[in-house]
Amino acid sequence: MALILISKAFADAEPIPEKYALEGKNMFPPLAWGGAPEDTRSFALIVEDPDAPSGTFRHCGIANIPARWTSLAESIDTSQEGALRFYQNDFGNARYDGPQPPDGDPPHRYIFRIAALDVPRLTLPEAVGVEAMWTQAQKHTLAEASLTGLYQA
């Protein structure tokens, strides 16, 4: 079975509800996955907008998700879960910041990617940013899955 990523908040290639956008409640959407390789030791997740005017914009990066987990709850970035490490996004925050495309732009794609890793944790400091974390995670990736949501201001 291949790794899969889903959300009960939106289906693949469908609109992301406003409450998960920056202009809404800016809540991290609930995510769930399955089909991870047997030798998975942790997971990493990234949320990015490849349609941003200045190039790919990273909204969230999370590493050190325990291998036994199969989901992330809504608003996980506001919980006190000590296992997770949030990396500085392109807004400069070590948390989730939701969609915020420019007014008048066509819908942007927000790609949620999860990677099953062969290491129990990444040790990079959160200040290195989402892009550096994901580059490091890719060196340890066993499998990857994605879910794309759409959002228009």
Image (cartoon, grey):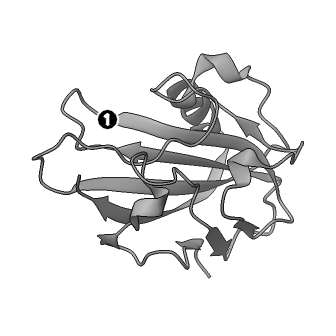
In this rendering, position of residue 31 left or right of residue 108: right
Percent position (x, y) of residue 5?
56, 70
In this rendering, position of residue 138 left or right of residue 62: left
In the image, farthest residue toward the front: 24
In this rendering, position of residue 117 left or right of residue 103: right
Q: Nearer the viewer, residue 12 or 80?
A: 80
Q: Quadrant of the N terminus?
A: bottom right
For disc 1, the marked residue is 56
In this rendering, position of residue 116 left or right of residue 130: right
* Residue drawn at the location 72% of the way across and 54% of the way down: 76
Residue 68, quarter of the rendered image: bottom right
Residue 61, quarter of the rendered image: top right
Relative to residue 125, is residue 63 depicted above or below?
Answer: below
Percent position (x, y) of residue 146?
47, 63
Is disc 1 surrounded by few (<14), some (14 to 19) or many (20+) residues within 10 Å?
Answer: few
* Residue drawn at the location 80% of the way across and 26% of the way down: 123
Residue 36, quarter of the rendered image: bottom right
Percent position (x, y) of residue 9?
51, 75
Say which amino acid is labelled 1. Answer: Thr
Relative to residue 34, is residue 116 depicted above or below?
Answer: above
Relative to residue 87, is residue 33 depicted above or below?
Answer: below
Count every numbered label the image shows and give the total: 1
* Residue drawn at the location 38% of the way across and 74% of the way down: 12
Percent position (x, y) of residue 64?
79, 43
Q: Nearer the viewer, residue 114 or 41?
A: 114
Q: Give SS at disc 1.
A: loop
Relative to residue 145, is residue 24 depicted above or below?
Answer: above
